[in-house]
Image: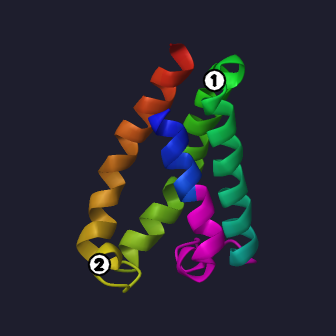
Amino acid sequence: MGLAALLGVAGVAHFVATDAYAEIIPRALPASRAWVYASGAAELVCAGLVAAPRTRRLGGWLTAGLFVALFPANVQMALDGGTGGGLLGSPLVAWLRLPLQIPLIVWAVWVARH
């Protein structure tokens, strides 16, 4: 249930702090706000799938794929020096987020397999 909670909070955050997330969408992608809404919705869907025992396996695999797909946004944020919004938007935190994606992917795969 921890992964579902994490995904739920992250998904809602995309709708609450849309502009902050739009800043980290890779510039090669047009319509950054649409990508933010889509990724937030995807996180909420994954949260629901992971939370339900019957769909947990599928949810785990989709979540792992989502984390891999979102990795370029995290790279973009690090290259841009963070979001500039306090400690959480600092360049240091932006770079520290990159290796943290690995355990998130591993966690999602673990959920899918168990």
Along the viewing direction, whichever of 40 and 28 lies nearer the viewer: 40
Residue at 61% x, 31% y: name it. Answer: 50
Residue at image mark 2: 90
Rendered position, 11 above or below 37: above
Q: Position of residue 51 (x, y in %)?
A: 61, 31
Q: Residue at x 72, y 55 (%)?
A: 41
Say what amino acid the circle numbered 2 marks: Ser
Q: Which x, y percent locates residue 16? A: 61, 74
User: What residue span does the magenta drawing correspond to?
Assistant: 11-31
Look at label 1 and name its amino acid: Arg
Rendered residue at 45%/62% (across/down): 74
- As helix, strand or loop, the secondary structure at mark 2 comes to loop
The CA distance from mark 2 to mark 1 is 34 Å
Choose between 82 and 49: the one closer to the eye. Answer: 49
**Mark 1, residue position:** 56
Q: Is residue 28 magenta?
A: yes
Relative side of 73 to 45, left or right: left
Q: Are marks 2 and 1 in contact (CB under 8 Å)?
A: no
